Image (spheres, rainbow, N blue to C red):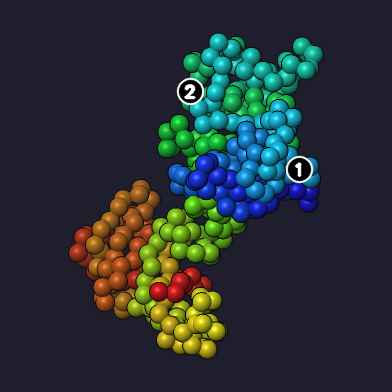
Amino acid sequence: MTAVLEVAGLAHRYGDKQVLETVSFSLSEGEIGCLLGPSGCGKTTVLRLIAGFEPPTAGEIRLAGEVVSAPGYALVPERRAIGMVFQDYALFPHLTVAGNVGFGLSQLTRQARERRVQEMLATVGLAGRERAYPHELSGGQQQRVALARALAPRPRLLLLDEPFSNLDVDLREKLALEVREILKREGITALMVTHDQHEAFAMADVVGVMHEGRIQQWDTPYQLYHQPANRFVADFVGQGVLLEGVVLNDHQVEIELGVLNGAIPSECLGQGGCAACARGCRVEVLIRPDDILHDDESPVLAEVERKAFRGAEFLYTLKLPRGGRVLALVPSHHNHAIGEKIGIRLGIDHVVAFKA
């Protein structure tokens, strides 16, 4: 499949501050990517470099095979055929919805422009609102107008900068799913940046988790959650705890709750590891809330230390007999009291472990 966007060895600095180091990834035609990470990790800088607002310190950016950014060179933004959706929508308050959506279509005839505006408003679910002004719309509707404006010129790449951060929490994930559906229907290649993993997982086909100017892992949401590449990804994506364990052999780890089968951390194996067979190497095993199953018949009892009601389920913090703690998601009709002991068992089908 054709690569629409290729980022190779990208690095950038502001004065003495290095903000990006060897960032590399690509997006195929129609693929939706996301850069996910905390504030200050460099994700917005990547977006700015792709948009052409400044040249990188090192590395290249290619659009459809054409180099558009390299050290000392940045093709001007208006020649990149890139659409942009900003965090604050950046709508023109004095223009109607139709005026905003048609703003970048000055090269078309009046009839063609009006036709494209109507197409875009229908696409984003705002047909009939062309005469409204931005202040007459809800936040979600304003974001749809911003999306329609960005898509109207038929860009080869769409960039979205924290597009849902100004919306209510309940609306963010819903709108992310709707925007994904629109982009897929239109066949648009897109890259979003966000600090919210729920938005990232709802929207993107592939996600790059960033930390300190580097992509720690570029993978599907499923793999990020179930097979994190390192401790940072394990901690940043989803919820979970690390339980102490001991390597029994090259495919088994023993933790307080039993013996697990799966891949052993590479640093425990071979030359430089604890031993040739890794036996006795101490590790920390990632346990997610969905790895712990409530089972009244289990001989293993854990004490309810904390509980958080989530509607359909409780998130319990459970204290194990030897002092370890795990999280468990339990259907909310199992309403256990603080201090109560409940039966649990493991539901893990693979090991995610890091050397202690």
**Looking at the picture, which amino acid does disc 2 mark?**
Ser
Q: Nearer the viewer, residue 112 or 66?
A: 66
| Mark in front: 2 vs 1 | 1
Disc 2 crowd rating (10 Å Cα; few below 14, some 14-19, many 20+) is few
**Looking at the picture, which amino acid does disc 1 mark?**
Val
Alpha-carbon span between mark 2 and mark 1? 39 Å
Q: Is residue 121 visible?
A: yes
On residue 138, which mark appears? 2
Q: Which residue in the rendered view is the most extreme toward the left?
A: 339
Q: Position of residue 65 (x, y in %)?
A: 79, 45
Q: Quick one: SS at disc 1?
A: strand
Residue for badge 1: 67
Determine the residue positioned at 71% across, 38% down: 73
Q: Would you place residue 222 above or below residue 161 in this image?
A: below
Q: Nearer the viewer, residue 91 or 238?
A: 91
Determine the residue positioned at 69% across, 21% down: 104
Q: Position of residue 313 (x, y in %)?
A: 36, 54
Q: Nearer the viewer, residue 333 or 17?
A: 17
Q: Quick one: SS at disc 2?
A: loop
20 sits to left or right of 60: left
Determine the residue positioned at 70% across, 43% down: 70
63 sits to left or right of 97: right
Toward which corner of the image does residue 179 lie, by quadrant? top right
82 sits to left or right of 132: right
